[in-house]
Amino acid sequence: MNRFISDVLHERAGHVGLITLNRPKALNALSLAMVRELSRVLTEWQHDPQVWAVAVRGSNKQGPFGAFCAGGDIRYFHQAALAGDASLEDFFTEEYSLNHLIQNYPKPYIAFMDGIVMGGGMGISQGAAWRVITERTLMAMPETQIGLFPDVGGGYFLSRCPGHSGEYLALTGQVLHGADALTVGLADVCVPSDALLALWDALSNPNCGSGKALLAGLQAQAADLQGACTVQNAPTPSWLDAQLNSVFALSSVGDIAGALTRLASGQTEGWAAHTLQALRQRSPLMLAVSLEQIRRGRHLSLADDLRMERDLVRHCFHTDHLQRRGVQTETVEGIRALAIDKDRQPQWHPERTEDVTPEMVAPFFASPWPEQAHPLRHLA
């Protein structure tokens, strides 16, 4: 049976549940309705003994694959924040609950991460038992570009990247091209994009006696394809480079920016200059919040990290300790500049990294809810 509800296609093929995100005009950006449908279907299949495994893919205007998920629907975030729409609170609570469900799914959950995989797309793929990418994969957590922080569990999975590459990815939103994602542990296998359909079709293999057997068969099939996945004309940073690690191990965004300034030495090209330019385009306040998030997330369970992020995102839209709400917040202003007016000239407050104080950052990490009333108190 094939059902279409709220831009999510799902069907059973043999003993495998197949999900296709089908909102291609929006690059499969997640709406609240999509989050709810994904949660409903995954919960149903979780308890169905006839479903042994689940697989998810995206779609583009030409058909399946080619785009996975560009994240949450930031235009909706902007509209809801300005209108005081309470559904915005529901979105983050339910999205983070979905991320937790996927990370703890009791059956093999397989993510075909072709094309754009960003933000919320990472949230519904990083918990997979097997994460498949291609030479077309463009992966990132670019939230600081809109005055947000790398949420959907980013504090958990980015902080567990090797060395201090997680801090680098969180602050800069650097895009990982194809196989680069393997290097930092955010993917498991890279195959040519033209092999995806054969792997997808193999999911309905009736000869597999369990989800684990099915997954093992797919992994063996994909192993024969590795090595053919290359990225043409894409920069390949030295993710484990001592310089990157030494810079992003520093204790503050100001110290990181200072180190990059010294390394760049007035140059306009090279890794340090490029990275410094990226940081200067981001909200200084939210860079400091994001750095603290990654540092704390490194020592938290997934559930506790998601609870922390739920606190953070509430403060992003209701920054009461700075007397900012709605249009006055860094997040609404960042979305305006990138996606609404598209002038790419956000007015950050404060404007300079040097002007961010600990008193501005610390309240983001104070929960606005008592423990027994936290919207994610049910996560174990």
Image (cartoon, rainbow, N blue to C red):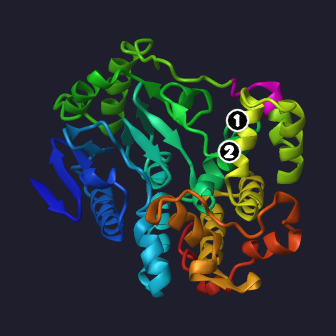
Amino acid, disc 1: His
Helix, strand or loop status at disc 1 = helix
* Residue that numbered label 1 is attached to: 274
Query: Relative to 299, is 212 on the left or the right?
Result: left
Q: Give the x, y percent position of residue 253.
A: 82, 52
The answer to whether residue 177 shows anywhere in this view is: yes
- Which range is magenta? 238-244
Q: Is residue 266 above or below residue 283?
A: above
Residue 261, quarter of the rendered image = top right
Query: Which of the 4 quarters of the picture holds residue 176?
Result: top right
Q: CA distance from mark 2 to mark 1?
A: 6 Å
- Residue 369 vertical placement versus 41 (above, below): below
The answer, for residue 252, to whether it is visible in the render is no
Queried whether the magenta region covers residue 102, the answer comes back as no
Residue 90: give its label.
none
Q: Within 10 angstroms of label 2, few (less than 14), some, or many (20 or more) residues?
A: some
* Side of 187 where 228 appears, left or right: left
Amino acid at pointer 2: Ala
Q: Position of residue 207 (x, y in %)?
A: 19, 28
Residue closest to the far left: 1
Mark 1 neighbour class, 10 Å CA radius: few under 14, some 14 to 19, many 20 or more = some
Classify residue 181 as left or right of residue 246: left
Q: Nearer the viewer, residue 251 or 284?
A: 284
Q: Contact, CB < 8 Å: mark 2 with mark 1?
A: yes
- Residue 231's spot in the image, x, y percent? 47, 20
Q: Nearer the viewer, residue 320 or 162?
A: 320
Asked if residue 207 is positioned above or below residue 165 in the image, the reply reads above
Residue 278, percent from left and from top: 68, 44
Name the residue that disc number 2 marks: 278
SS at badge 2: helix
For residue 215, side relative to residue 100 (left or right): left
